[in-house]
Amino acid sequence: MKFAIVCLTAGLAWSQPLYDLLLKQGHVIDPANGIDKVMDIAVANGKIARVAANIPASEARKVIYAQGLYVTPGLIDLHAHVFGYSGSIFPDDSALPAGTTTIVDAGGAGWRTFDEMLDRVIRPAKTRVLSLINIVGHGMIGQAFEDNVADMDSEKTAAKIIERRGHIVGIKTAHFGGYGWTAIDRAIAAGNLAKVPVMVDDKILTLTGRTSKEKLLSKLRPGDMHTHVFNDRQLELVDRFTGKLQPYVAEARARGVLFDLGHGGGSFLWPVAAKAMAQGFFPDTISTDLHSSSIMMAESDMPNCISKMLNLGMGLQDAILRSTVSPAKAIARYPELGTLGEGRVADIAIFRLKSGVFAFKDAWQHKTLGTQKLECVLTVRAGDPVFDLEGRGFPEWDKAGKYEVIR
């Protein structure tokens, strides 16, 4: 009898599905692993268990079919606003419907306020939230605070980074309206102490005493990031008279300075983007600078930003690289993030690439038409579907033995 019970139990165990979730027949783009073809992805215990062709549907508890769609690692938005800033958005409301599973808050909290952000935003969110901590101790709460050089403490900023290393991935300096280099110098000093990169959002307006050339070649270190790459108030990327790419920009890139899109509500201009990209200068990382204004008018979520890059000449595979692997590397979270490698966390996005005629707006609300538009269909975060536009993971409603269309 004991032998029979053992055999029965073993048989039941043998029949149990191997995987919690199986994504079938989608075109997988995983730049980290050199995959660009139709594959299946199996998920177990919140991690990628297998990536292969034709994994049997019988081996999974839930199967989602993705024929004709693109399957990618969950996107990483390197520049968003979810705390401190007056236009902050709770990340799950904007990131997950866009296929974005990781966002980096760009300067909302400083060393004085980061623990509040940890409790109010980072821990409650399903989205993975990381932080570029502001060099200003009070964070991004208005010009009077952001111009206060007395609150730019390099040592206390570095100490908070070291204390919260799992959540803080770098430093942000933004919106400084004063004269000279104090904000950038103190941010970089903190970066040196904590061994993290700095993201710069810095005006080069008349009477600031700052220039793009000096900033890129004398101030920023290899690995530091200049966001708002296509806005000529923070960075003179192309010559305003000739339209040619500035020589010092190529020189800065060659020495390791990174250029981030940072679309936002005022920082993506068609004339700058079109001229730069026509000369082969693409942003190293694609990000949204998403906040309550940019999400409504400019609609600058990650699929929208990627769509604009596609219509300006970037290939889809390259755009996914700059939305997954490249930002993960920029914040030293690769290969933990940004890949569909077996054993990695199952952060996955599924997209439809639509063809037609679509209107796109820049941050100054000028419109142009494009022929490609990326749309998020489904988002998986740590193995769980958290956004499903078309109910692909939902069972069909069987009414009276047959499926019906409700009219």
Image: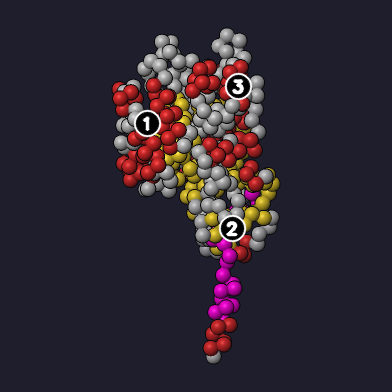
The spot of residue 182 in percent (x, y) is 39, 21
Residue depth check, mark 2 versus mark 3: number of the one nearer the observer: 3
Quote the CA–CA distance across marks 2 and 1. 43 Å
Q: Is residue 14 magenta?
A: yes
Question: Which sits earlier in the primary sequence, circle 2 or circle 1?
Answer: 2
Contact, CB < 8 Å: mark 2 with mark 3? no
The spot of residue 77 in percent (x, y) is 50, 37
Residue drawn at the location 50% of the way across and 25% of the way down: 220
User: Which span of residues is magenta-colored?
Assistant: 8-26
Quote the CA–CA distance across marks 3 and 1. 28 Å
Question: Which sits earlier in the primary sequence, circle 2 or circle 3?
Answer: 2
State the residue position of label 3: 251
Quote the CA–CA distance across marks 2 and 3. 42 Å
Circle 3 Cα neighbour tier, 10 Å, few/some/many (<14 / 14–19 / ≥20): some
- From the viewer's perspective, tell me whether residue 349 is left or right of residue 29: left
The amino acid at mark 3 is Glu
The amino acid at mark 1 is Ser
Circle 2 Cα neighbour tier, 10 Å, few/some/many (<14 / 14–19 / ≥20): many
The amino acid at mark 2 is Ala
State the residue position of label 2: 49
Residue drawn at the location 49% of the way across and 50% of the way down: 381
Residue depth check, mark 3 versus mark 1: number of the one nearer the observer: 1
Question: Which sits earlier in the primary sequence, circle 3 or circle 1?
Answer: 1
